[in-house]
Amino acid sequence: MASEKVETVVAGNYLEMEAEEEGSKSTTSKLSRLFWHGGSVYDAWFSCASNQVAQVLLTLPYSFSQLGMLSGIIFQLFYGLMGSWTAYLISVLYVEYRTRKEREKVDFRNHVIQWFEVLDGLLGKHWRNLGLFFNCTFLLFGSVIQLIACASNIYYINDNLDKRTWTYIFGACCATTVFIPSFHNYRIWSFLGLMMTTYTAWYMTVASLTNGQVEGVTHSGPTKLVLYFTGATNILYTFGGHAVTVEIMHAMWKPQKFKMIYLIATLYVLTLTLPSAAAVYWAFGDQLLTHSNALSLLPKTGFRDTAVILMLIHQFITFGFACTPLYFVWEKFIGVHETKSLCKRALARLPVVIPIWFLAIIFPFFGPINSTVGSLLVSFTVYIIPALAHMMTFASAPARENAVERPPSRLGGWVGLYSMNVFVVVWVLVVGFGLGGWASMINFIHQIDTFGLFTKCYQCPPHKA
């Protein structure tokens, strides 16, 4: 009986939201609806797939050179499935939290629910603070990485300016994302972003295969444990893009349909990352150890320049994906989140961009910074904390009995679910955070010792530095 009541509450409010969206069609233009205001299952899928594979697509061949071909393929498949699992856990906790709040007649129509609020409502303030710290720090550095990638990519088209100067320029460009209100408004951007990475991935694959292996190519990886676990952690980072899962779900008209979306998005992403990384590594081998951006080794052609330009646009989109949750947190902190004035909210958001800009100039280490962020932040943000939070939320028998989303019987019910969660926590804590953190920090410190902080042009040819 309790379960039926829960379903009624959830469906009732979601249908009400959908009805409001339908009603808004009479007052908005068809063009606006088509390009600007999305909330369907397809919008969520495009958002997940587009956000998951961004600039990291260009660094995966670098990871293959550290791991070797076989390990690179295995880790992509393994972390792809693990990321899909924890994204599913996050979606279950979101629906649980929202249902409980809506029983209390809480109205979320002018409020975007975020991960730290889910943790707060289900487990209390200490979990909220933990989630807030890791999520915001990860998204902050995720935005930093997009800026670094912009400068790294544009340099291969126009090297008249050094990468630091390009970072200044693209920092200003990315600041315009303050005018995008929420994930509802990423409909056209998500679609275009995925088309752009699809082109780039297949360009890398075809260009590598048609140009063939470079003379004297060697494939010696893995050679060192430090490099091995650094590469593995970059792949952990690749499939840890679900730090914005809650915000994407909240933008849906029917969030309860999200459950399998991330898995399907991951399967598509694997059709891009596996062929491109394997082909580039096959063609260039150990040269990738000193070229973290795969585009730097591919011959300069119109096709490559097109890939660079498309990735630049996509990195602008991904910057918005990573930064929008930070905008929401800042808006709530200063008390302007529920205002209807877009200009007021945009102005209030600008201070969030400044530290991102500054950090991108301090640490311009495209490639190594991904692994460092992956081991120290992604490991907790989207793997360990969701698995632990799910176990704690449903630890009591009454909580399991009244759960809105019960574990599928084919997974072994609650016993199977808890077993998988324990495996995720132990694996990521030991391999991702422990060994990955050790390896990534050694590599990151090596980059600082070699190039220095505030380096003007990271991994540029000597005569351009």
Image (spheres, rainbow, N blue to C red):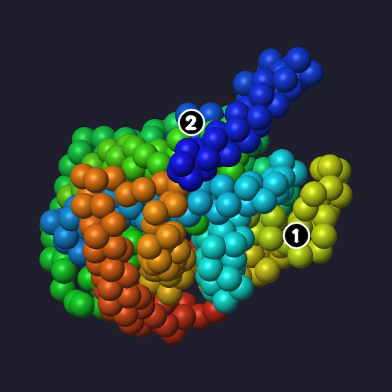
Q: Residues within 10 Å of mark 2 (few under 14, many from 20)?
A: some
* Residue drawn at (43%, 51%) of the image: 403
Residue 365 visible in the snapshot: yes
Point out the tag, 1 or 2, that comes first from the N-terminus: 2
* Residue drawn at (76%, 58%) of the image: 331
Asked if residue 448 lies left or right of residue 226, the reply is right
Residue 332 numbered tag? 1
Residue 278 location, x and y as percent? Answer: 21, 48
As rendered, which of 151 and 124 lies closer to the eye? 124
> What residue does disc 2 label?
41
Residue 438 location, x and y as percent? Answer: 33, 82
> The residue tagged with tag 1: helix, strand or loop?
helix
What's under tag 1, amino acid-wise? Lys
Residue 50 visible in the snapshot: no
What's under tag 2, amino acid-wise? Val
As rendered, which of 207 and 117 lies closer to the eye? 117
Residue 357 location, x and y as percent? Answer: 66, 64
Asked if residue 257 lies left or right of residue 276, the reply is right
> Can you name the residue that lies furthest to the front here?
1
Q: Quadrant of residue 118?
A: bottom right
Give the vertical position of 79 relative to 279 (above or below): below
Asked if residue 211 lies left or right of residue 335, the reply is left
Q: Quadrant of residue 182?
A: top right
